[in-house]
Amino acid sequence: MAGSFPWLTLLTFSPIIGLIVLLFLPGTNRRALRWTAIVTTLVPLALSLWLFAVHDASDPDAFREKADWITIALNHEAVNIESSAYVFQYHLAIDGLSLPLVVLASLVAVMAALASVHIKKRWKAFYVWFLLLETGMLGVFLARDLILFFLFFELTLIALFFLIGIWGSLNREKAANTFLIYNGLGSALMLIAFVLLIATAGASLNATQQGGDLVYTGDYATIRSNLTAENSLTNLPGHYENPFALSDGMRWAIFILLLAAFGIKLPMLPFHTWMLRVHAEAPPSVVMIHSGVLLKMGGYGLIRFGVGLFPGLAEEAAFVLALLGAAGVLYGAALAFVQTEFRLVLAYSSVSHMGIVLLGIASLNEIGLQGAVYQLVSHGLISALLFLIVGSLHERTGTTELDELGGLARPMPFMSGMLLAAGVASLGLPGLSGFVGEFLSFLGLFETMKWVTAIAAIGVILAAVYILRSVLKITFGPQQERYAALKDARLIEAVPMIALMAFIVLLGIYPSVLTDAMQGSFDDIIAQLNARMGG
Amino acid sequence: METVLSQYAWLVPVFPLAAFLILLAFGRGMKRTGPVIATLGSLASLVLSALVLIEQLGGADEYNNGFDWIQIGGYTLTVGFDVTNLTALMMVVVSLVAFLVNVYSIGYMKDDERISVFFAYVALFTCSMLGLVIADNLLMLYIFWELVGLCSFLLIGFWYYKPEAKAAAKKAFIVTRVGDVGFLIALLLLFWYMPDHDLSFAAIANVFGQTGLITEGITTLIAILIFLGAVGKSGQFPLHVWLPDAMEGPTPISALIHAATMVAAGVFLVARTFPIFEASPAALDTVAWVGAFTAIFAASIAIAQDDIKRILAYSTVSQLGYMMMALGLGSVTAAMFHLFTHAFFKALLFLGAGSVIHAVHTQNIHEMGGLGKTMKTTAWTFAVGALALAGIPPLSGFWSKDAILAEALHDHPALFAIGIAAALLTALYMSRLFFLVFAGKPRKGASGHESPAVMTVPLVVLALLAVVAGFVEMPFEGTGWFGEWLTGHAAAHEGTALVMLVSTAVGLLGIYLGWLIYVKGAIPRDAVTKRMPWLTRLLERKYYIDEIYHAVFVVSLRAIGRAFDAFDRHVVGGAVRLAGGAAVWTGRAATRMQNGQLQSYGLYAVIGLVILAAAIAGRRFW
């Protein structure tokens, strides 16, 4: 079915093709630039939907693409070692964990490209960075080599830096700098953790007649099996003679580094403040991607690298993770309640909702982990929709300060209705996607930590409080004179709103679409945890 | 007997859903046809559910069908529907009231420019409420439970430009959500404690029917948490505060959602999960006392209110308290019977009130008067509803209230006393309301006119139902078939003659008092106010519950939020600035190191070497 055609490479780099086309277009032809970008983003969407449809969990190698990419020979003088080298691979693959997020990323990218109609200047450069960003985030979810993952991860960072810094609002440069420094810090921690992993668990000996070939690799599967297999070098007692061994202390160090690196991205309390500025300053279509997809890389990383590589440590840290999650849920909600700027309400609401992801992860059972991924996807769709609306609102009213808005339901019934629908999706109304993610996360965690779940569930009330407060402030109330003449959504704005809402409803009514795709993705983790408990 | 139509019971909520979708897609251009489509949707539901009920009355077997909704690992969450006697009855009640309210609204809302939006919301509500009724498991019931809450919110806030409507809608959603979290946690508990993680009502009845499968402590906890959800939805103390405010919505909505159907969902929920409550005496006691307290508490507030709809709203809260009390006394029959009759006479009263408001454009009963002459149909149908509510024989409310009071007398004399006292207050506030609105002379020049037939016909239909609905269960030999049909065993009727006598006497006394005060003037109206001004104020201000909640919850949440905000800005944000500052500082320091002096380069090299050596030496301790 897949043959040998590199579908995943095409998926990842198709935005680059569009980018090249863009380079040949005149920078003043706004329409051509915009439509080229929009059409370009449709390619990965079509490909990812197709992959989603044909993906078969029992055949994980169907779309695997693997090639040696960088080989650095080492001059190793040790006994019995023929040759040694660092080998980094170009390695893309899909599984039940990454596929939903790939679909999310490509979907949100299309919607954000449509929403970029509000961008006012330097369109060509904007779409170039935009498409680079898309390649970066698709690559993050597909890469199965640590170094490749890191490169894609950094690509998103750089692209977003320019998108904020050039096209943001008043304090854009400051916001871009804060973003870069803080995320750069996170990347540094990630890199340290990755290097430590490659240098120990990444090592594999290929026995030959004379002795063996020593290869250090960033391959996820190799590292994972070395970390988990009982008699791998990594797990043999650590002495001078065995430089590949990882002591408990080192494992914890790596685990905590990963936790911090991806915790910053998620964001996990107390690493969240950097993203407030991004929410408030970046252009709304960029925030759609930022809040809709980029934050999800944090959750993805936590599951893939944190829990996936160190299930045992994750289990020991589960209580702390759950507490951090619950704290995030409540803290974010309380803060969202007192904000006067709508974008900050949404930013803190993201903190609160990503707390739920953490709760799902901390459950370390299949329901909770699926709940966490479900919540990632659902929040991605909902926050993309919310910022899509914010962008259109801001375009018309010139402000997103709650005190200056009100009564918009009369001049703009469609958009106000959409805002209300997105709002109730965000507060977890059943029938819409937010509920399923929330419910599964709570359900999973409840098995192991009843009290933490019960306390975090108070966040469900608080979500209603802050969402309704701000959404009703904008749409309800007496009509204001200055907004009387505003026009409702245009077609190009309405289409992405309806599309996103349709996905939110679909996932709310028929969750099996997503849960069936994730079926079995966490079997390895669960099996390992069970083995630990048994042994 | 074979089940034929019951297999298609899932279609009952689908008709209004289809109407909703049509209105959602094309509503803007359908000011005239939109209402008709929604009404036809509810009519289709009514016809089918009536056929299903007839089939069930004929002794058909219960029917259940469903499919897997989410499957994760070895766990499955299902959706499905259940046709039992209880659900068949509820479906008819809901679709009947919904249909009548739809017809009525065609007249009542005719001049509103957003009429198709209104009917779309009503259709969505009807669909969700019917879904709630036929759900065969607790999770699905919860899903529809939240959806009816959303519709209630949307319809309370239908006139979104009114600040009061906005506040009331918000309050309704949030206050009921407090209860819903209890319900949610109960769901989580049940999922993990039930064998096979089965949340269906059949399994619940099976498991909790046997002793010892689930410990009593957990049983009580689950029951109380479910009840918390019911308290929120059914406006029981202390979560009753949203229901009177909900009267900001259009009056047909008050009749449909906030009197007949949604607010009764709490009672239905407890009845549906009754095996859990039966397994826990402590939970039953809680339900009984909360219900009884709410009954008298809300009735006392109703006496001092001036807004016609608010009086009826407090009356609803009070009557729901009666139903909860019946459940707490262990009688699903009495509770469901009262729910059944109450749905008709309270919907009737609200629609009658709507007819009055439509005519005089005020809701203050002191500004009305003498409307009995100009609005004959409204007046006599309203009188039927009021008498039924006051419990005067042989109207429906008399039989159902007596069934509850008889249970109370049998089990719990103290609750009986409270019930009788609340009945007296009920009769008093209803006679006050009726006489001030329909008797005497017109005040403030509002003379009123009768409403069009599209509004009065539903009134007449409901009035007929309010008269006859009680005859399905009478406390005489061989007449109690409702209870037997619903629960499988006939209700006990001991000492009912006494109950009938006392409650009738109390009802008549209340009406007589009202007549003396508001018609005859034999007792001055301000007699109580003069002697005990504090009491009047306490009742008028509704025991200051709203003020207390505002001070305790709203103010403190805001304070916490502000404190967190300051913390976030200065402490957490400070750390970020520090990190940023550190990067800049490091950069500057490193720049200074590039000073061109060979000695300092040498020094850095040595320092670096030492660090490297230390690191390598430290490797052994890893």
Image (cartoon, coloured by chain):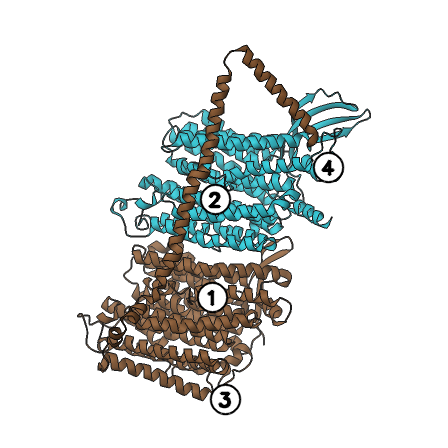
Chain colours: A cyan, B brown
* SS state under label 4: helix
The amino acid marked with disc number 2 is Val
Of tags 3 and 4, the one toward the viewer is 4
Residue A30: % across, % down: 38, 30
Bin the neighbour count of mark 2 within 10 Å (Cα to Cα): few under 14, some 14-19, many 20 and up: many
* SS state under label 2: helix
Q: Are marks 1 and 4 in contact (CB under 8 Å)?
A: no
Res A184 label: none
Bin the neighbour count of mark 1 within 10 Å (Cα to Cα): few under 14, some 14-19, many 20 and up: many
Q: Which residue is mark 3?
A: B477
Q: Chain of mark 3?
A: B
Of tags 3 and 1, the one toward the viewer is 1
Q: Which residue is mark 1?
A: B230
Q: Chain of mark 1?
A: B
- Residue at x 48%, y 86% (from the top left corner): B479
- Residue at x 42%, y 80% (from the top left corner): B417
User: How many numbered circles are shown?
Assistant: 4
Between residues A482 and A25, which one lies in front from this camera angle? A482
* Badge 4 or badge 2: first in the primary sequence: 4
Q: Which residue is mark 2?
A: A351
Q: Are marks 4 and 2 in contact (CB under 8 Å)?
A: no
Q: Are marks 1 and 4 on the same chain?
A: no
The C terminus of chain B lies in quadrant: top right
| Residue B23 in the figure: left or right of residue A141 | left
Of tags 2 and 3, the one toward the viewer is 2
Q: Chain of mark 4?
A: A
| Residue A210 in the figure: left or right of residue B328 | right
The amino acid marked with disc number 3 is Glu
Q: Are marks 2 and 1 on the same chain?
A: no
Q: Which residue is mark 4?
A: A235
Tell me: residue A178, above or below residue B397. Answer: above
